[in-house]
C-alpha cells in the first residue's frame, strides 16, 4: 500500500508540473510574424510584446514629440541567405509600420548598446537578433497583428 501511494503521489506531482509547463508555454504569445524576401535574402520578424513608457516634458520638447507615451515593440528578427553568394544586409534599414506610423530606427535588445553596421551574410547562413523599435503613442497588442516591415534604403548586394 505504501509503494502504490508513493507512485500515485509522484504521478500527481508530474501531472502538476506538466500542466504548469503547458500554461506557461501558452502564455508566451507572439502577435505577428512578418516575412519579406528581397534579392534571395529572407527576413522574418516575430513581434512579441509591447512596453509602454512615459516621455518626460523635457524630452517631449527636446525631441519634438507629440505624445507623453512611447510604445517599445519587441521582437525577433531572422535573416536567411537563400543564395549561393554572399549578401550584405543592414539592420538600420528595417522599420515597422503600424497604424499609419513608421517606427524609430531598430535597436538590438541587449544589456549594452552597440552600433549596427552593414554585415555580410554567407550563403545559406541564418542570423537571429532580439530587437525593438520605438513608436510614438500607445499601441495595443492587437495593433501588432497589422504591423508591416518596411525596408528603406536597402542595398542588397
Image (cartoon, helix red, strand yellow):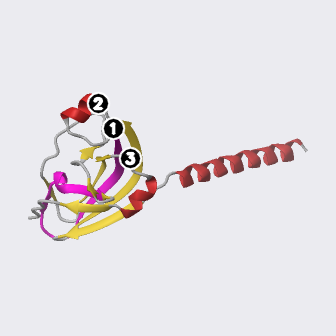
Which percent across, then down, holds residue 44?
31, 62
Question: What residue is drawn where x is 26% and y is 51%?
Answer: 103
In the rendered image, residue 65 lying in the magenta stretch gets the answer no
Residue 138 has which mark? 3
Report the side of 8 relative to 147 (left or right): right
- Look at the image and give the residue range highlighted in magenta: 68-97
Residue 60 pos. (x, y %):
25, 35
Element on which disc 1 rests: loop
Name the disc covering residue 57, or none: 2
Judged by depth in the image, the label closer to the viewer, 3 or 2, is: 2
- The answer for how far apart the CA atoms under marks 2 and 1 are is 7 Å
Count neighbours of disc 3 (C-alpha within 10 A) and say few if under 14, some if 14 to 19, many if 20 or more: some
Whether tag 2 and tag 1 are in contact, CB under 8 A, the answer is yes
Secondary structure at numbered mark 3: loop
Residue 35 disc label: none
Distance from Cα at disc 3 to Cα at disc 2: 17 Å
Q: Quadrant of residue 72?
A: top left
Measured as percent of width and height from the top left, residue 52 is found at 40, 41
Q: Residues within 10 Å of mark 2 (few under 14, many from 20)?
A: few
Amino acid at each position: 500500500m505504501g509503494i502504490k501511494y508513493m507512485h500515485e503521489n509522484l504521478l500527481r506531482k508530474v501531472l502538476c508540473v506538466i500542466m504548469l509547463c503547458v500554461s506557461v508555454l501558452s502564455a508566451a504569445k507572439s502577435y505577428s510574424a512578418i516575412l519579406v524576401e528581397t534579392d534571395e535574402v529572407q527576413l522574418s520578424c516575430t513581434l512579441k510584446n509591447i512596453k509602454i513608457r512615459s516621455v518626460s516634458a523635457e524630452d517631449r520638447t527636446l525631441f519634438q514629440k507629440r505624445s507623453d507615451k512611447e510604445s517599445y515593440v519587441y521582437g525577433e528578427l531572422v535573416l536567411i541567405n537563400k543564395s549561393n553568394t554572399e549578401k550584405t544586409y543592414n539592420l538600420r534599414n528595417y522599420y515597422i509600420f503600424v497604424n499609419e506610423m513608421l517606427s524609430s530606427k531598430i535597436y538590438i535588445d541587449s544589456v549594452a548598446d552597440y552600433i549596427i553596421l552593414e554585415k555580410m551574410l554567407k550563403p545559406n547562413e541564418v542570423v537571429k537578433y532580439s530587437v525593438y523599435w520605438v513608436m510614438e503613442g500607445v499601441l495595443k497588442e492587437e495593433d501588432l497583428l497589422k504591423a508591416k516591415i518596411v525596408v528603406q534604403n536597402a542595398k542588397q548586394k
